[in-house]
Image (cartoon, rainbow, N blue to C red):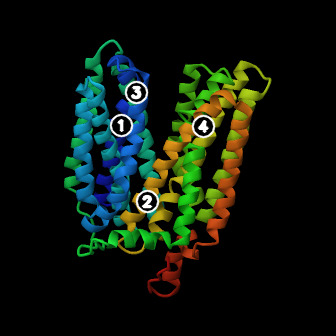
Amino acid sequence: MDAAMRRIHVGNALSAFGLGFTVPYLYVYVAQVRGLGAMTAGLVLAVFAVAALVVLPFAGRAIVRRGPLPVLLAALVAAALGALSLGVASSAAAVLVSAALLGAGQAVMQPALATMIVDCSSAETRSRAFAMQFFLQNLGLGVGGLIGGHLVDTSSAASFTLLFAIEAVMFLLLVVVMVTVRLPHAPRIEAAPVASGRGSWKQMLGNRAMVQLCVLGFVLFFACYGQFESGLSAYGVEAAGISTSALGTALAANTLVIVVAQFAVLRFVERRRRSRVIAAVGLIWAVAWAVAGYAGLGHGSQEMATAAFVSTYALFGLGEAMLSPTVAPLVADLAPEGMAGQYNSAFALVKQLALAVGPAVGGPLGASLHAPYIVAFLLFSLGITVLAVRLGRQLTDVQDQPWLAKSRVVARGGASVSADV
């Protein structure tokens, strides 16, 4: 791992650590500590999603034209200002504006950092680089949330101000780290006409494989990540009688599986077709939903229901560990030269849409319509398998099996091979 990639990974860990301090406690802070009520707290969470949806279509074009580093630095400064202002905001208007600024900055960080990883990696090292990114993100979120939980005091607004100040410091520290990064040369479109922004989106939408991957990505994030803290947790509490402490254990089990299994899983998936790995994740998640069905709809003891519910989150973690070295590198490999920022931003936009729709659909279903909820999301998981198999038919051999690029270079005595996208 070269110096640039090390700094990028440090940046990922710092940003996740900062987010872990505040994200789990945002609702409590707005609704209870600031006394603004559940409605305002819900609007704050919605503003995060809306801000991301607004800025991401422009972020991709900015990354293509200016490079990922300047865009990342601007996003970090915006996020730091948003975190600081959120920590001292006392009115609903101030909280919402601060949340919009913080949410926009957080959203732009994702494609900018992903594009930097693409620029600093090769086809052979990209899966491992994205696996390391996912590992550090989860580790940072877990550690940040753990420390933040010991610092907060719901009777003291000052303790939350401290949390948001720490988050802002993490973002500013990341600015210092990123300024020292020296990225390898990557193609940029400096002199592109204004209308080319629409042209680049049209070009991307003409890439059938990328369109299918975006559809698949929406279902992935809708059926898993969009349910963690909404539909699935509501289902666990209402149908399975899961206590809040057991729910915390389930979330910890999810993170633990990712942290422990990530690199063992990486060795397993590196030499397998990406489309088949994603298809296998759909099957694993279908089993997870079936286990969740047993937890809430079965007739076992409360201990068995709790164990089954925790196992559901652990199985989701296993699937996430398989996806991290698979999906993000595939987005990069589908992008034409110099367009990785556009493609990363488009996929991040799809993710945000799924994360906005997922809780809105899954929350009410999970809380009241228990059996239909489980059946619906079990079918969504099987749909992931079907969509992944169909995607595999659109991919070139090298896109689906990236290690072939290296073997072909060796076989041809060092001649480079390029794949059409």
Residue at point 31% right, 53% down?
8
Callout 2–callout 1 Cβ contact below 8 Å: no
At label 2, the amino acid type is: Ala
Q: How many residues crowd mark 2 within 10 Å: few (<14), some (14–19), many (20+)?
A: many
Mark 2, secondary structure of its residue: helix
Quarter holding the N terminus? bottom left
Q: CA distance from mark 3 to mark 4?
A: 19 Å
Provide the residue designation for mark 2. 346
Q: How many residues crowd mark 1 within 10 Å: few (<14), some (14–19), many (20+)?
A: many
Residue at point 33% right, 21% down?
151
Provide the residue designation for mark 4. 362
At label 3, the amino acid type is: Ala
Q: Is residue 146 visible?
A: no
Q: Along the polypeptide, which appears first: circle 3 or circle 2?
A: 3
At label 4, the amino acid type is: Gly
Q: Is residue 240 left or right of residue 45?
A: right
The picture places residue 73, in percent across and down from the top left corner, at 23, 52
Q: Which picture quadrant has residue 340? A: bottom left
Q: Residue furthest top?
A: 155
The disc at residue 19 is 1
Callout 3–callout 2 Cβ contact below 8 Å: no
Provide the residue designation for mark 3. 41
Of 138 and 93, nearer the camera is 93
Q: CA distance from mark 3 to mark 1?
A: 17 Å
Q: Along the polypeptide, which appears first: circle 2 or circle 1?
A: 1
Q: Along the polypeptide, which appears first: circle 3 or circle 4?
A: 3
Q: Is residue 79 visible?
A: yes
Callout 2–callout 4 Cβ contact below 8 Å: no
Mark 1, secondary structure of its residue: helix
At label 1, the amino acid type is: Leu
